[in-house]
């Protein structure tokens, strides 16, 4: 592969390929540091750049958790085979992409129901907070 140190990567589709450590290390240094620490590779020349990350065990675990959370929060979500929008702007984008107004109609239905049940009532400025019966 043109590198002294290569790592074997298993991709999401199941394909296994060797890649240069320098490329994978630049892309995901936390995973490389974790792997080097678990397999006692930090003394080898190609793995030395990951020592500073791996030495800070507590920080390493924080970085790993951040990477997991970041990938989870940015991953698209699906329900019953349909992509779920992240916010209203994304819902409008999906409607435009599919050439319909299903998300807009669903949002309008929800807002109409909230208005029908008078969920939010503006009492104006300077009024006392209403008492709520919790029985």
Image: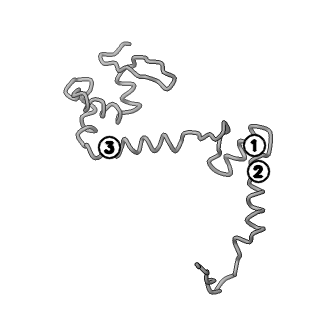
Real-space Cα separation, disc 1 to disc 3, in angstroms: 40 Å
Tag 3 or tag 1, which sits nearer the N-term? 3
- Label 2, secondary structure: give it: helix
Q: CA distance from mark 2 to mark 1?
A: 8 Å
* Corner quadrant of residue 94: top right
Residue at the image position 44 percent from the left and 18 percent from the top = 16
- Report the side of 45 relative to 11 (left or right): left
List the single residue furthest toward the top: 1
Residue pictured at 32% horizontal, 43% vertical: 61
Query: Residue, x 24% and y 34% (percent of image)?
Result: 51
* Residue at the extreme left of the image, as rendered: 43
Is residue 97 placed above or below 92 in the rendered structure? above
The residue carrying pointer 1 sits among few (fewer than 14), some (14 to 19) or many (20 or more) residues within 10 Å by Cα, namely some
Horizontal and vertical percent position of residue 9: 41, 22
Q: Is residue 128 left or right of residue 60?
A: right
Residue under numbered circle 3: 61
Task: Decide: is 61 above or below 36.
Answer: below
Quick check: 94 left or right of 55? right
- Mark 2 or mark 1: which comes first in sequence? 1
Q: Residue at x 43, y 22 (%)?
A: 10
Callout 1: SS: helix
Q: Earlier in the sequence, mark 2 or mark 3?
A: 3
- Badge 3: how crowded within 10 Å, few (<14), some, or many (20+)? some
Disc assigned to residue 104: 2
Q: Give the CA separation, mark 2 to mark 3.
A: 41 Å
Q: Is residue 30 above or below residue 41?
A: below
- Of 87 and 13, the residue lying toward us: 13
Query: For the image shown, how many numbered marks are present on the structure?
Result: 3
| Location of mark 1 (residue) | 95
Quadrant in which the N terminus appears: top left
- Disc 2 packing (10 Å; few <14; some 14–19; many ≥20): some
Residue 87 horizontal/vertical position (percent): 64, 51
């Amino acid at each position: 592969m043109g590198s002294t140190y290569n790592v074997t990567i298993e991709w999401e589709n199941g394909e296994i390929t060797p890649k240069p450590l320098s490329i994978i290390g630049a892309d995901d240094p936390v995973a490389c540091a974790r792997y080097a620490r678990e397999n006692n590779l930090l003394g080898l020349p190609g793995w030395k750049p990951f020592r500073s990350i791996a030495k800070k065990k507590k920080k390493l675990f924080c970085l790993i958790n951040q990477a997991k959370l970041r990938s989870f929060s940015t991953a698209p979500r699906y329900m019953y085979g349909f992509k779920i929008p992240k916010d209203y702007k994304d819902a409008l984008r999906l409607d435009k992409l599919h050439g319909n107004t299903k998300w807009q109609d669903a949002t309008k239905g929800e807002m109409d129901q909230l208005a029908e049940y008078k969920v939010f009532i503006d009492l104006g400025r300077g009024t006392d907070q209403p008492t709520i019966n919790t029985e």
